[in-house]
Amino acid sequence: FVKNLECLMLPEGWHAENVKLLLKGARNLKFLSITGYDDDVYLNRICLADFFSTDNPLMCICFQRFSHLHPDIMSFIFKNFATTLEYVDLSYTNLQGLANCSNSLPELANMKVFIAPIDIFDSPIGDNGQPEQTRCTHQLVSVLKLMPNLRVLDLTYNLHLTSNGVDIVDILANHCPLLEQLFLGCCWIPAEKLVNLKKLSFLKRLDLDHPRSKIEMYFDLPSYDYAASFWNIATFVIPHLKELEYFSLTHSD
């Protein structure tokens, strides 16, 4: 009875069985948005692969504020909707949902927007004194490499984007050259790594905000070198960004 459903938005408080009931018969769904909650107990009961038809022309998927996103969900979505998917929003969601994503995924040529800031203040703290939610860096990078036409990327609060052999700026410069809006606030990217942003010649907005005391006092992080970052951006990056309209590198307490 929901075969022609095109858009479904579920706020906090949904029940897993109701989601299955609504989606099982859908064949024309383009927009799916589900909001979780911090102490959610339903997520591991939900895997779209079990009941969601790949006949749906899915263009936009939003899983917001999920504390334990099923590890197979995003792999299923990327594999089966690569030709239609344009917008993914994982705001304040644990990136374990990317755990089973790998380089075997198809190219996501139509992807335009990828939103994945995390809420590190509500995340469990690991033995290294940093939030558990930032551990899926390699999976995140493997997915971004498949998005050559990406226009908007938000990775705010992802703290491991330049650790464990990962250099997010270099990866974006080489694999997402058409980016127009980039949000890397509170990612603690070293000043010397920022220089390669000059390759993103289509950038119109660049956000590198770092609220100083809020982050450094809460986690075991070194002080961020704002002066060096600003110098490198102003000297080596901005002269190459002819389309740039907005740049922010604040460090308010």
Image (cartoon, rainbow, N blue to C red):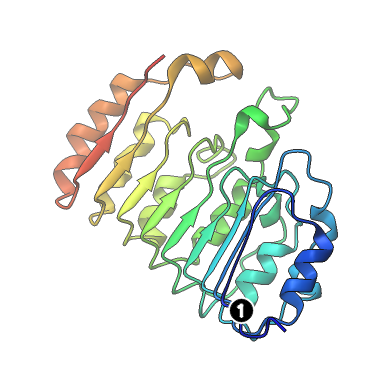
Position of residue 123 relative to residue 7, above or below, is above
Can I make out residue 47 in this image?
A: no
Direction from residue 14 to residue 135 in the image, left or right:
left
Position of residue 31 relative to residue 199, above or below, is below
Residue 132 locus on image (x, y percent): 70, 35
Residue ID at (79%, 65%): 18
Q: Quadrant of residue 250?
A: top left
Residue ID at (46%, 66%): 147
Residue ID at (49%, 62%): 145
Under circle 1, the secondary element is loop
Direction from residue 205 to residue 186 in the image, left or right:
right
Residue 116 locus on image (x, y percent): 53, 48
Kind of residue indicated by mark 1: Leu
Residue 16 locus on image (x, y percent): 81, 60
Label total for image: 1
Question: Foreground residue, 225 or 152?
Answer: 152
Residue ID at (19%, 47%): 244
Q: Quadrant of residue 224?
A: top left
Question: Foreground residue, 5 or 162?
Answer: 5
Looking at the image, which residue sits at the far front? Answer: 1
Direction from residue 92 to residue 233 in the image, left or right:
left
Question: Would you call the spot at circle 1 few (<14 residues within 10 Å), some (14-19), or many (20 or more)?
Answer: some
Question: Foreground residue, 225 or 87?
Answer: 87
Q: Write down the residue under mark 1.
A: 5
Direction from residue 245 to residue 65 in the image, left or right:
right
Position of residue 166 relative to residue 104, above or below, is above
Position of the C terminus by quadrant: top left
Position of the N terminus by quadrant: bottom right
Can I make out residue 21 in this image?
A: yes
